Image (spheres, rainbow, N blue to C red):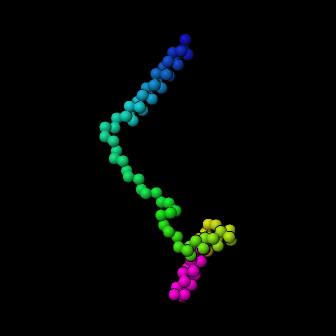
Amino acid sequence: MTTITSRAVAAAFASLIFASAAFAQSTTTTPAPAATPAPAKTASTKQRSPESIECSKQADEKGLKGKERKKFRRECIKEAKGAAAKKQ
């Protein structure tokens, strides 16, 4: 008999906790203003220079990744733009 009573008390206590949480969440009277989402950055938003594309291909061929790739591309683009400036 005590198990039925203790189960009833536990059920009442649990429903009290869940009910108070439900009431606490629904007491908002005014909705929060919706934030306008920032435009998603996609790869197509910025045009890549031909030098950048060529240097990326070279880095792919060499299998470079991470910091080594970044360093290689930076130097490659600098050299390519310098060579293009000398031609003009």
Q: Looking at this rendering, what residue extends furthest in the left direction?
A: 30
Q: Is residue 12 above or below residue 88?
A: above
Q: Residue at x 52, y 70 (%)?
A: 48
Across and down, in percent, residue 59 comes to 64, 71
Rendered image quadrant of residue 76:
bottom right
Q: Residue at x 31, y 40 (%)?
A: 30
Q: Residue at x 48, y 67 (%)?
A: 46
Residue 31 within the magenta-colored segment of the rendering: no
Q: Residue at x 58, y 81 (%)?
A: 79
Rendered image quadrant of residue 50:
bottom right
Q: Is residue 22 above or below residue 37?
A: above
Q: Is residue 39 left or right of residue 43?
A: left
Q: Nearer the viewer, residue 58 or 8?
A: 58
Q: Which residues are magenta?
A: 73-88
Q: Is residue 19 left or right of residue 60?
A: left
Picture quarter with the N terminus: top right
How many labels sit on residues?
A: 0
Asked whether the viewer can see residue 71, the reply is no
Across and down, in percent, residue 58 comes to 64, 73
Q: Nearer the viewer, residue 78 or 2?
A: 78
